[in-house]
Amino acid sequence: MSLLDISGLEAGYGDVKVLHGVDLHVEDGEWVVIVGPNGAGKSTLIKTVFGLADHTGGTITLRGESMTDLRSKEIIRRGIGYVPQNDNVFPPLTVAENLRMGAYILDEVPEDTLAEIYDLFPILDERRNQKAGSLSGGQRQMLAMGRALMLDPDILLLDEPSAGLAPDLVEETFQRIEYINDTGTAILMVEQNAKKALERGDRGYVLVQGRNRFTDDADELLGNEEVRQEFLGG
């Protein structure tokens, strides 16, 4: 049984249909990458899993239990974390307050988990009393990931984690994601830097116009001439 299983997924926004029967699965501890051209439905897929897009067909299950009609608050409780590409921190709150917000469904903030996140992202520890709105783009991305990790999710959904970051910060972000994955958290990632993501990931899906185009192990996709030319920049 897969950790996350998506079958025949159809979804979109109101009358606009974006996904047309997408299949995807993620195993325990796996790092899966979704790539494809703009408008392929990559972000919509992740948003649908997290209850933020309109699901119109197909199934979504987590460890065999249906997630299809659950709201985001219930999905978080099931063990799924989500880091959106934009508007992913609370600017008026401090770094520490943002992280504690990640545990809002719990009776008490897990201080040991908070300490682990500060260890993973030392810059957040240094700036714990700084307003999130004053952080750089890379620091905001770290804060958003840290907040999503406060509930120790089984799988973390990442939407374009390297978007807008300087090259050195892109590498640092991927290193942090690799560490998170190595600790046992499965990763389902949409990423514009497709080649770098596939070099780190286990498997990949290429979406085109809301449909599966290619599905394979990451190294096989990297070695596929058609995939390289059309989706990886040659």
Image: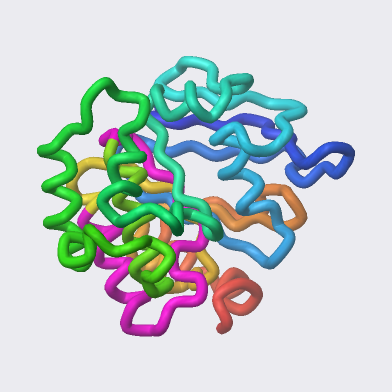
Residue at the outermost right position: 15
The answer to whether 77 appears left or right of 160 in the picture is: left
Q: Where does the image place residue 35, in percent across and percent down from the top left?
A: 56, 61
The answer to whether 137 appears left or right of 29 in the picture is: right
Which residues fall within the magenta stretch? 151-179
Question: Residue at coordinates 45% horizontally, 24% vertically from top-left?
Answer: 62
Residue 125 falls within the magenta-colored stretch: no
The answer to whether 54 appears left or right of 31 in the picture is: right
Question: Residue at coordinates 45% horizontally, 31% vertically from top-left?
Answer: 4
Residue 162 falls within the magenta-colored stretch: yes
Quarter of the picture holding the C terminus: bottom right
From this view, report whether residue 165 is shown above or below residue 22: below
Q: Where does the image place residue 148, in percent across and percent down from the top left?
A: 36, 44
Q: Where does the image place residue 170, in percent across and percent down from the top left?
A: 37, 75
From this view, report whether residue 161 is shown above or below residue 69: below
Question: Residue at coordinates 24% horizontally, 59% vertically from top-left?
Answer: 129
Q: Where does the image place residue 184, in percent across and percent down from the top left?
A: 22, 41
What's the image's color scheme? Answer: rainbow
Front-most of 39 and 147? 147
From this view, report whether residue 21 is shown above or below residue 71: below
Front-most of 29 and 77? 77
Question: Residue at coordinates 43% horizontally, 65% vertically from top-left?
Answer: 133
From this view, report whether residue 191 is shown above or below residue 229: above
Quarter of the picture holding the N terminus: top left
Q: Is residue 106 visible?
A: yes
The answer to whether 141 appears left or right of 23 in the picture is: left
